[in-house]
Image: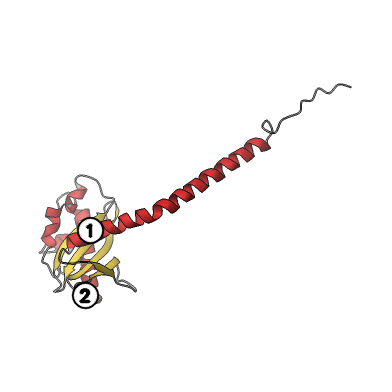
Amino acid sequence: MTNDTKKTSFRDGMYGPTIILLIICLVISGALAATHQITAPQIEKINKETADAARMEVLPEADSFTPEAGELPEGVAEYYVADNGAGVVVTAQNKSFGGTITVMTGIDAKGAITGVKVTDHSDTPGLGTKAMDSGYLSQYQDLTALDDVDNIKKDSQVDQVTGATVSSNGIYGAVKYALAAYEEMGGIN
């Protein structure tokens, strides 16, 4: 009797490649987890510094900020009070052309807007982002209220960017949320 059957080695069988692939996946997953552990604090620090710089830009009289705890009004993502009593910075979100637009609004202790800045959006680059230019956003400065209307086209105090009406209206709505939050939250307390 002859034995023509070949003995298969571990690597040639079905289990060998599966185990090797499993080991590679475990090593890669461990490396990604370790990288995340190392970089997460740095990313958080950079994000905080960027947000603080944006807050200082819209409320330049402030020295530092403390977040308001508790439930926030509709459309408001963050409500920061200036530690020196200069005012508040409200981060509000609204629907825009490309999705959600995030807008930071500085409001002084008297209730007047000191600055507006778009911090996140998905709108079309070019025409849609013209509504986010600092020159356009400066029209909100010194306003203490907006007309009681549902659309920027109907407001007599601010203009829209032609061709970027939806983006202009998204910013307008976020600023309205910020002013309403200032009133509802009692200003700087």
**Label 2: how many Cα within 10 Å (few below 14, some 14–19, many 20+):** many
Q: Look at mark 2 in the image and give the residue it sits on.
A: 188
Where residue 176 sits, quadrant-wise, is bottom left
Near-viewer residue (145 or 78): 78
| Figure label count | 2
Q: Is residue 95 above or below residue 74?
A: above
Q: Is residue 45 above or below residue 7?
A: below
Q: Is residue 153 above or below residue 6?
A: below
Say if mark 1 contacts mark 2, CB within 8 Å.
no
Q: Is residue 75 above or below residue 26?
A: below
**Label 1: how many Cα within 10 Å (few below 14, some 14–19, many 20+):** few
Q: Amino acid at mark 1?
A: Ala
Q: Quadrant of the C terminus?
A: bottom left
Q: Look at mark 1 in the image and give the residue it sits on.
A: 53
Q: Nearer the viewer, mark 1 or mark 2?
A: 1
Q: Quadrant of the N terminus?
A: top right
Q: Residue at x 26, y 56 (%)?
A: 50
Q: Where does residue 2 sit, x and y in percent of width and height? A: 86, 21
Which residue occupies the extreme right position in the image? 1
Q: Residue at x 63, y 40 (%)?
A: 19
Q: Secondary structure at mark 2?
A: loop
